[in-house]
Amino acid sequence: MEADLLDIRAGIKAGRYVNEATVSQGIVQRLLNTLGWPVYDTEIVAPEYSLGTRRADYALCHPPREPVILIEVKQVGQSKGADRQLFEYAFHRGVSMAILTDGQEWNFFLPTEQGDYSERQLYKLDILERDPQQAESSFKRYLEYDAVRSGQAIESARSDYRDAARKRQAKRTLPDAWARLIESRDELLIELVADKVEDLCGVRPDLDAVASFLRQQAPAGSERADASAPKKPRRTARPTPTSDAPKSAGYELYGERHGARNATDVLVKVFREFADRDSSFLERFAALPKHGRKRRYLARTREELYPGSPQLVGNAHEVRLRWWVDTHASKSGIATRIKMACEVAGARYGKDLVVNLG
């Protein structure tokens, strides 16, 4: 087949295929023959196959007279816009695969799959651009006679289509995922930005400043509200009953309120509270399999908290003798550490423990 493809490529470049008939006979039939199709058996390779008031250039049948693939042939360079017509042929007949080709470009469609018709295009092969060995592999995967008869070709095509559909869905979701990461001030994202700033200028920024910067980068409309909709006049809110949560930096644990100087102080005091109530708390927290991206949140030494970043050891606070907690974090990062502590301690964050990070 590689020799056939090389000769066809040379013919296309030389302008040998001057109309649909020469493409049909000199390229399509030639490749079908090489792929094992009995091109002279018109019950299997049916030319000018009738589809009501229309005709497909070829219907490849299995069993005989039962089309499984339709092929529409156009003059070289004239296939644009013909895909919709071919798609309609195949869709209304429930044919598994449809192929549109001008000899040079081969477009493979799965008409019965889900999605917009343009999304049901499985594969595009340009035999001038692809290496002959790659082109041969693709033709054999989707169009070899034995593979079509066994059902393997159609199954391979459907598997490849589902994989492509999943990739399209993931690509469509990227903007929303990015917006949500920014809105939530994800700790990993904050750490990545802070690391890059430090790499570029040698100074590590305050993580709350990084979180504030990311919040300002949120795309318009990312708050899930339609910015173009007319705004309703704001009503002056009536004073509402306040909760028992601390109003300045501090925390309330099992109904008992404690003050704190700032968010870091809240973190350290909460860890001490849980350690006082359960002597195994610190060991169990330290044993968690995952802490931060690069560091542990709790360790026996300050150096263990900041491997490769000795300049950060001053951010460690001693919770208990020979137990150090990492406080180099934004407020959202501190909240993450406290939530993890609640899970280890068996306390309900927001109920048994209410915090205000100031």
Image: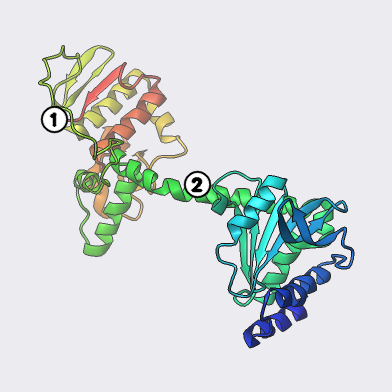
Q: Position of residue 128 (x, y in %)?
A: 62, 77
Q: Nearer the viewer, residue 354 or 328?
A: 354
| x 88%, y 58%: residue | 43
Is residue 280 visible to the viewer in this orientation of the structure?
no
| x 33%, y 24%: residue | 275
Q: Residue furthest front?
A: 53
Rendering colour mode: rainbow
Mark 1–mark 2 distance (CA, rounded to whole Å): 47 Å
| x 79%, y 74%: residue | 30
Are there few (<14), some (14-19), or many (20+) residues within 10 Å of tag 2? few
Report which quarter residue 273 is drawn in. top left
Residue 261 marker: 1
Whether residue 197 is situated above or below residue 217 in the rendered picture: below
Left or right of 113? Residue 24 is: right
Say what amino acid the circle numbered 2 marks.
Answer: Gln
| x 62%, y 74%: residue | 130
Q: Residue furthest bottom?
A: 14
Q: Position of residue 160 (x, y in %)?
A: 64, 53
Q: Quadrant of the N terminus?
A: bottom right
Whether residue 150 is situated above or below residue 184 in the rendered picture: below
Report which quarter residue 97 is drawn in. bottom right
Location of mark 2 (residue): 169
Whether residue 22 is situated above or below residue 150 in the rendered picture: below
Say what amino acid the circle numbered 1 marks.
Answer: Arg
| Comparing labels 1 and 2, the label whose residue is closer to the camera | 2
Secondary element type, mark 2: helix
Q: Nearer the viewer, residue 229 or 264?
A: 229
Is residue 120 visible to the viewer in this orientation of the structure?
yes
Left or right of 179? Residue 108 is: right
Mark 1 vs 2, N-terminal side: 2
